[in-house]
Image (cartoon, helix red, strand yellow):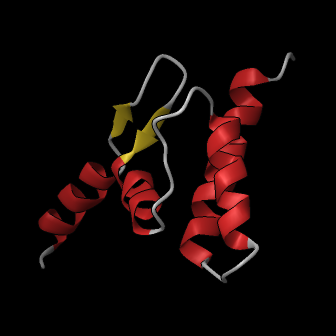
C-alpha cells in the first residue's frame, strides 16, 4: 500500500458516523465494537462504556480498551460543565 492509499484509509477509518442524536462513532470504533459484539445503538455513550467494561472484565483486549478510552474522553469533553 502506498502512502496515498494509507492516508485515505486512515481518513476513512476516522470518519464519524451518526448513530443517534447523542452518539457519533468512527468507523474504526464501530468495527471494534462489532468485533466484540457490543451494541452501540443505545441512548448514551455511558451505556456503551458499561458494556465495554463488562467485556474487559473477561478478556484482555487492547483495541477495545483504546476505544473505551477515546469514548471516555469524548464523554468528558462533551458532557462536563466547564
Q: Determine the residue located farthest toward the bottom in the rendered image.
A: 60
| Place of residue 14 in the rendered image (x, y in percent of width and height, measured from the top left) | 36, 49
* Residue at x-position 46% and y-position 58%: 33
Left or right of residue 55: residue 8:
left
Closer to us: 4 or 30 = 30
Query: Based on the displayed image, in which of its 4 quarters is residue 74 positioned?
Result: top right
Image vertical order of residue 41 relative to residue 30, above or below: above
Image vertical order of residue 63 relative to residue 81, above or below: below
Closer to us: 53 or 77 = 53
Left or right of residue 34: residue 47:
right
Q: Determine the residue located farthest toward the right in the rendered image.
A: 82
Closer to us: 8 or 44 = 44
* Residue at x-position 22% and y-position 60%: 9
* Residue at x-position 71% and y-position 38%: 46
* Residue at x-position 44% and y-position 22%: 20
Left or right of residue 73: residue 21:
left
Amino acid at each position: 500500500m502506498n502512502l496515498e492509499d494509507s492516508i485515505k484509509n486512515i481518513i476513512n477509518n476516522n470518519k464519524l458516523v451518526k448513530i443517534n442524536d447523542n452518539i457519533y462513532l468512527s468507523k474504526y470504533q464501530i468495527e471494534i465494537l462489532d468485533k466484540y459484539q457490543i451494541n452501540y445503538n443505545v441512548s448514551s455513550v455511558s451505556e456503551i462504556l458499561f458494556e465495554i467494561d463488562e467485556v474487559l472484565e473477561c478478556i484482555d483486549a487492547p483495541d477495545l480498551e483504546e476505544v473505551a478510552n477515546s469514548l471516555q474522553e469524548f464523554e468528558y469533553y462533551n458532557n462536563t460543565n466547564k
